[in-house]
């Protein structure tokens, strides 16, 4: 939560600091219970990742096998040096079955996360990320790791998953009046920098920070975001290869198409047909640069 001295007088009149403290205590207690749960195949996966080492791409999947399948298909083509691991946070058993099957078919490591007890969008995502870090990443001890949302599609060639060589973290920064953090859907960490820190991927709305914002104190507070090389995101115009209609989409680092809003609502429906058309065009060999020309 926010430092007490940064609450305005009217916040105190509304007892906002007390409410924020209680919510934070509740969320931490709830998350601690979730972190204590075990997943089937957990130790086998840890042993496998210990042998792999290097850089891990951690994909949190949720309810949308088609998006994950597209991501994994293009990752093999456009970021061949990446090593992706899928963690399934889906609620519906049928979706978990489908996601497990496609990971097996693509020979991608898969782990079904323990059933998530919350229906809150940000809390569910934060619980999942914290569980993955504390129960898989810490014992596996990779050189570095990155969380990638399942709707981040690598549509253009990229040498590696993310560039993390000369700095401890990398991703898309989100700033508020009281702090900053990296967007949970695209964030990377060097393990030797964070292994002794108490990472917590929950949100911190009191500080104006979304999922992952609780890492403001243990990680980001000592880093100067202006001195770090950060990811870039742009709203670009892409042409539907079938209808010819233009769409405005988000592109990260000039190679990731972020679909957005595909997990918890139907906000992606306007882009679903577009995604199908783009996927077909790319599969036929049409370059991404023709669909989404570089900006002048």
Image: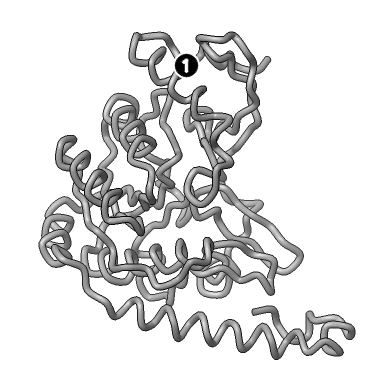
Seen from the viewer's position, the closer of residues 284 and 161 is: 284
Q: Position of residue 223 (x, y in %)?
A: 58, 63
- 29 to the left or right of 177: left
Q: Position of residue 281 (x, y in %)?
A: 41, 12
Seen from the viewer's position, the closer of residues 256 and 35 is: 35
Q: Quadrant of residue 99?
A: top left
Residue 214 vs 287, above or below: the answer is: below
Split into 4 quadrants, where in the image is the C terminus?
A: top right
Residue 296 vs 252, above or below: the answer is: above
Q: How is the image coloured?
A: one colour
Q: Is residue 240 visible?
A: yes
Q: Position of residue 76 (x, y in %)?
A: 27, 29
Seen from the viewer's position, the closer of residues 9 and 266 is: 266
Split into 4 quadrants, where in the image is the N terminus?
A: bottom right
Residue 39 vs 104, above or below: the answer is: below
- 229 to the left or right of 180: left
- Mark 1, residue position: 288
Residue in the image at 57% along x and 74% along y: 217
Q: Position of residue 4 (x, y in %)?
A: 74, 86
Residue in the image at 39% along x and 82% along y: 32
Q: Secondary structure at mark 1?
A: helix
Q: Quadrant of residue 69?
A: top left
Residue in the image at 56% along x and 68% along y: 203
Q: Which residue sits furthest right? A: 10
Residue in the image at 28% along x and 63% along y: 113
């Amino acid at each position: 939560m926010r430092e007490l001295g940064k609450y305005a007088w009217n916040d105190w009149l509304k007892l906002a600091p007390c409410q924020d403290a209680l919510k934070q205590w509740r969320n931490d207690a709830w998350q601690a219970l979730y972190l204590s749960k075990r997943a089937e195949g957990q130790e086998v996966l840890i042993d496998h990742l210990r042998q792999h080492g290097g850089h891990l791409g951690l994909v949190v999947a949720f309810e949308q096998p088609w998006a994950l399948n597209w991501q994994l298909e293009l990752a093999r083509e456009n970021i061949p040096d990446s090593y992706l691991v899928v963690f399934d946070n889906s609620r519906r058993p049928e979706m978990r079955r489908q996601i497990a099957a496609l990971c097996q078919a693509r020979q991608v490591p898969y782990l079904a996360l323990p059933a998530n007890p919350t229906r809150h969008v940000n809390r569910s995502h934060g619980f999942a990320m914290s569980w993955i870090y504390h129960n898989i990443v810490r014992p596996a001890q990779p050189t570095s790791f990155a969380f990638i949302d399942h709707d981040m599609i690598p549509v253009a060639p990229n040498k590696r998953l993310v560039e993390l060589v000369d700095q401890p973290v990398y991703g898309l920064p989100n700033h508020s009046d009281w702090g900053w953090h990296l967007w949970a859907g695209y964030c990377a960490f060097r393990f030797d920098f964070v292994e002794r820190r108490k990472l917590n991927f929950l949100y911190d709305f009191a500080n104006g920070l979304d999922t992952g914002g609780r890492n403001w104190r243990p990680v980001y507070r000592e880093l100067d975001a202006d001195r770090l090389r950060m990811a870039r995101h742009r709203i670009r115009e892409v042409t539907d290869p079938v209808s010819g209609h233009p769409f405005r989409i988000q592109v990260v680092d000039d190679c990731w198409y972020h679909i957005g809003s595909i997990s918890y609502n139907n906000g992606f429906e306007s882009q679903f047909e577009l995604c199908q058309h783009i996927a077909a065009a790319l599969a036929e060999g049409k370059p991404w640069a023709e669909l989404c020309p570089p900006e002048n």
